[in-house]
Image (tube, helix red, strand yellow):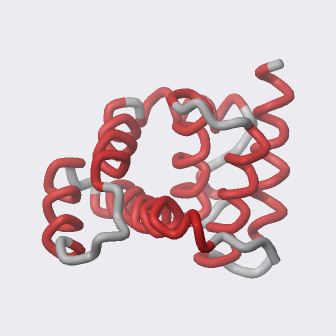
């Protein structure tokens, strides 16, 4: 197992972000109200990067159609996946499109999130489609 202690803040923030994306997709809430809720619930925690959280959640909210189209281009049907897996894929696709991280790092983080939040076999599904996405981009 990798020692992720020095990345505790961004790891925790990404975990909250996936939960917020789930809420965005499940409840069809706007990003601003979700952000306010998460800030209120986690205001005292110093290990949350709210600037990154806000930037990412806003980007995902604004580009939901583009992200959904990307999933469709990968031949992923909504009926083929759990909502938590869809949330993780939304997180990853947004990271690929907006951040400066290497693709393998985004996939690694997505697999970690899948193992934490989804069923034990979902990481294989996530890995397959994110790998396919990267290959199509190159």
Relative to 76, is 42 above or below? below
Q: Position of residue 123 (x, y in %)?
A: 77, 66
Q: Position of residue 49 (x, y in %)?
A: 35, 56
Q: Camera-side residue: 79 or 49?
A: 49
Relative to 76, is 64 above or below? above
Residue at x-position 74% and y-position 37%: 103
Quadrant housing the C terminus: top right
Is residue 131 shown left or right of residue 17?
right
Is residue 138 shown left or right of residue 112?
right
Residue at x-position 57% and y-position 63%: 7
Residue at x-position 76% and y-position 81%: 120
Relative to 87, is 131 above or below? above
Q: Position of residue 3 (x, y in %)?
A: 72, 73
Is residue 54 shown left or right of residue 84?
left
Residue at x-position 69% and y-position 29%: 73
Quadrant housing the N terminus: bottom right
Farthest residue in the top direction? 138
């Amino acid at each position: 197992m990798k020692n992720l202690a020095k990345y505790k803040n961004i790891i925790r923030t990404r975990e909250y972000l996936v939960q917020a994306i789930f809420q965005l997709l499940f409840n069809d809430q706007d990003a601003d109200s979700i952000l306010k809720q998460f800030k209120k619930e986690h205001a005292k925690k110093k290990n949350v990067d709210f600037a990154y959280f806000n930037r990412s959640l806003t980007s995902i909210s604004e580009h939901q159609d583009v992200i959904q189209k990307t999933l469709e281009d990968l031949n992923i049907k909504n009926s083929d996946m759990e909502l938590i897996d869809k949330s993780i894929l939304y997180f990853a696709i947004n990271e690929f499109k907006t951040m400066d991280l290497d693709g393998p790092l985004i996939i690694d983080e997505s697999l970690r999130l899948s193992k934490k939040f989804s069923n034990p076999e979902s990481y294989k599904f996530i890995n397959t489609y994110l790998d396919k996405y990267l290959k199509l981009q190159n």
